[in-house]
Amino acid sequence: MAGGDTVHYSYEGVTIFKDKTTPESAAWNWTIAGGTGKFTGLKGTGTCEGSWATGAYKWSCTGAYELK
């Protein structure tokens, strides 16, 4: 980001595959564990759901964050 500010995320979830190489769907949880610069003190959590269509994932993510 501009000015060197960063946000630190972690993701954990499951991806379902149709076969050995073709993903079908995914469900992930995300967590914001902080940041630097103007994002120092940032916290947040949420979920993402993905589906595979026409060679690319389509993601829908929701959640909440707070900057203290």
Image: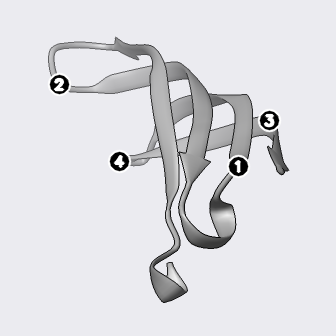
Marks 3 and 2 sit apart, C-alpha to C-alpha, by: 30 Å
Residue under pointer 4: 55
Of the two numbered discs 4 and 3 in the rendering, the one whose residue sits closer to the viewer: 3
Q: What is the number of the mark on residue 21?
A: 2
Marks 4 and 1 sit apart, C-alpha to C-alpha, by: 34 Å
Q: What is the number of the mark on residue 42?
A: 1
Q: What is the number of the mark on residue 63?
A: 3
Q: Earlier in the sequence, mark 4 or mark 3?
A: 4
**Tag 3 secondary structure:** strand
At label 1, which amino acid type do we have?
Leu
At label 2, which amino acid type do we have?
Thr
Q: Earlier in the sequence, mark 4 or mark 1?
A: 1
At label 4, which amino acid type do we have?
Gly
The residue at 67%/71% (across/down) is 38
**Tag 1 secondary structure:** strand
Marks 1 and 3 sit apart, C-alpha to C-alpha, by: 13 Å
Of the two numbered discs 4 and 1 in the rendering, the one whose residue sits closer to the viewer: 1
Quick one: label 1, few (<14), some, or many (20+) residues within 10 Å? Answer: some
Instruction: Examine the rendered structure and indicate whether residue 6 appears above or below residue 68.
Output: below
Marks 4 and 2 sit apart, C-alpha to C-alpha, by: 12 Å
Q: What is the number of the mark on residue 34?
A: none
Marks 2 and 1 sit apart, C-alpha to C-alpha, by: 36 Å
Side (left or right) of 60 relative to 57: right
Side (left or right) of 19 relative to 15: left
Quick one: label 4, few (<14), some, or many (20+) residues within 10 Å? Answer: few
**Tag 2 secondary structure:** loop
Is mark 2 in CB contact (under 8 Å) with mark 1? no
Q: Nearer the viewer, residue 68 or 12?
A: 68
Instruction: Examine the rendered structure and indicate whether residue 38 appears above or below residue 41.
Output: below
Quick one: label 2, few (<14), some, or many (20+) residues within 10 Å? Answer: few
